[in-house]
Amino acid sequence: MYDFLTGMEFYRFLKGPMVWFAFIIFTGGSAYRVISLVYRSRNAKVIYTYMDLKYSLRSILHWIIPFASTNMRNHPWMTIITFLFHGCLIFTPVFLLAHNMLIQESWNIAWWTLPERTADAMTFIVIMCVVFFAIRRLVSPEVRFVTSASDFVILSIAAAPFVTGFLAFHHLMIDYRLALNIHILAGEIMLIAIPFTRLSHMLFFWLIRAYTGSDFGAVRHSKDY
């Protein structure tokens, strides 16, 4: 088993067919979930009746800018950690030198990359944020009340590519080839999980904020931030 997990054959499978499978499931699943939500929303006529571009954009902007909402200002540390986590989670894999080298090698496409030390620090930030979120779910009464085992599974799925990438980069604890193969597999599992788990909030955030902002702005004549 160990020989298989560290072998070149498994590496080539993860880098080849498995990558395509993960991207197809991610893109197809994401498109299905978004289209499905939009279609089902059309049946609930009240939703589109109140949708307003101005209030939609106002709400989205206030919720993607740190400390732009009252709730964020009331919880400054949670705001900082949440924005650090999401920023590093999204931008680190996209602008990582090693990832971009693979993309250039496969499709001759290249773009700007993060300095290695910066990417390493951002990876560490993601890991520490996940640790914080896990501890918070265990010790904070109001969060523990709504926490289930699936929340820790989701956190594990989000953390696994970064933990294994960190171990592989620094050659820590386990064999480099094993860490690398598990890192690739963990990234692919995360891609596949996005459309079908609570990670899908990255797909629906914009729609939910647009509806909530329109409801508060156009109907209640108040603010949702």
Image (tube, grey):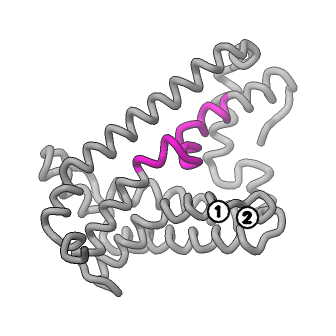
Quickly name the residue at label 2: 76
Question: What residue is shown at x 81% (from left), y 61% (from top)?
Answer: 145
Residue 154, above or below 141: above
Q: Estimate the x, y position of residue 54 in percent, counting from the top left.
A: 67, 24
Residue type at mark 2 is Pro
Which numbered circle lies on residue 191?
none
Q: Residues within 10 Å of mark 2 (few under 14, many from 20)?
A: few
Give the mark nearest the N terminus, 1 or 2: 2
Quarter placement of the C terminus: top right
Q: Residues within 10 Å of mark 1 (few under 14, many from 20)?
A: few
Distance Cα–Cα, label 1 vs label 2: 27 Å
Residue 109, above or below 149: above
Quickly name the residue at label 1: 149
Span shown in magenta: 191-210
Q: Estimate the x, y position of residue 165 in percent, counting from the top left.
A: 34, 70
Q: Secondary structure at mark 1?
A: helix
Question: What residue is shown at x 83% (from left), y 68% (from top)?
Answer: 141
Q: Secondary structure at mark 2?
A: helix
Residue 137, above or below 36: below
CB atoms of marks 1 and 2 within 8 Å: no
Q: Estimate the x, y position of residue 19 in percent, counting from the top left.
A: 26, 49
Quarter placement of the N terminus: bottom left
Residue type at mark 1 is Ala
Q: Quadrant of residue 208?
A: top right
